[in-house]
Image: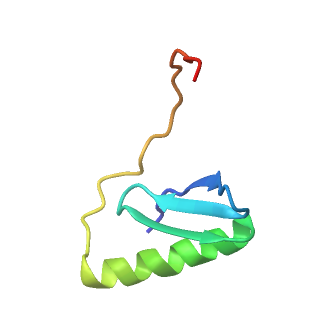
Amino acid sequence: MELSAILTPAPEGGYVALNPETGTTSQGDSIEEALANLQEATELYLEEFPITFSGRSLMTTFQVTRHAA
């Protein structure tokens, strides 16, 4: 089963990885480590909460007005 992963830099270093189809998250010092940890977390999640796969999530971008703090 092919799922999606969204990676963002973590403020403390490394990366946070999110799987939007299941809501599982993990982290790692590198992209590879974050993805491996996300894969493990997602597999464990799916053992307990199987899902019916209806297609991969779509990721896009949008803009918001930036307000001064």
How far from the left and from the top, in percent, is residue 12? 69, 62
> Residue drawn at (41%, 51%), measured in percent from left and top?
56
Q: Nearer the viewer, residue 66 or 68?
A: 68
> Residue drawn at (35%, 78%), measured in percent from left and top?
45
Q: Up-down: is 38 above or below 63?
A: below
Q: Quadrant of residue 50?
A: bottom left
Q: Nearer the viewer, residue 18 or 10?
A: 10
How far from the left and from the top, in percent, is residue 57? 41, 47
Q: Say left or right for 9 vs 60.
A: right
Quarter of the picture containing the N terminus is: bottom left
> Residue drawn at (49%, 59%), measured in percent from left and top?
18
Q: Quadrant of residue 34?
A: bottom right
Q: Nearer the viewer, residue 8 or 61?
A: 8
Quarter of the picture containing the C terminus is: top right
Q: Up-down: is 59 above or below 54?
A: above
How far from the left and from the top, in percent, is residue 61? 53, 29
Q: Say left or right for 69 vs 41.
A: right
